[in-house]
Amino acid sequence: MFLNLLVQIAVKIFMASNIYKNKTTAQLIKIAVRHFHLFIRRRDHGQPCISCGSYNTSDASHYFSAGNHSVTRFEEDNVHLACRKCNYFLSGNLIPYRQNLIEKIGQERFDQLELLVNISKKTGFKWDRFSLIDIINKYKALNK
């Protein structure tokens, strides 16, 4: 019975990785972002903008930008719902975002995010196919 379960898991992993075998890393990032942002929108549904407090939220906003700090692109503590004005036109409206983020997740978890960013600046970071496929599968399952 245990062996049968292991075989089923191995087949699922093989099939999941097989679906994405012809995808580039950039294409996998786009797929992962789509599923991750949907998760964030569902998780934070009904909550106000992390920066200004308005209830007109539509964007999954990164405190540490995904473009400059790819290591935190899929960190749930780094991404929260924001209104389009704050996220897009005010570049995240980061001063109130920081205050509200620390209030929401606590100083210790915020410090861990900062540490992760600082370490990745020194060591560099690039997403690999296996990590991206894991992220896609995780958030696909959570969004069901």
Image (tube, grey):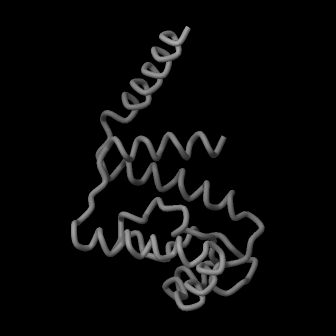
In the image, residue 119 lies at what x, y percent?
A: 30, 70
Residue 112, image quadrant: bottom left
In the image, residue 21 lies at what x, y percent?
A: 32, 33
Front residue of 23 and 2: 2
Q: With respect to residue 137, does 95 lie above or below?
A: below
In the image, residue 62 lies at what x, y percent?
A: 50, 72
Residue with the most extreme front position: 108
Residue at image position (67%, 87%) is 52
Q: How many marks?
A: 0
Q: Give left or right: position of 47 versus 28.
A: right
Residue 16, image quadrant: top left
Q: Is residue 19 visible?
A: yes
Which image quadrant: the C terminus? top right
Residue at image position (53%, 70%) is 109
Which image quadrant: the N terminus? top right
Residue with the most extreme bottom position: 95
Residue at image position (65%, 70%) is 58
In the image, residue 100 lies at what x, y percent?
A: 63, 83
Q: Is residue 67 visible?
A: no
Front residue of 77 and 49: 77
Q: With respect to residue 5, does 92 lie above or below?
A: below
Front residue of 57 and 137: 137
Residue at image position (64%, 45%) is 143
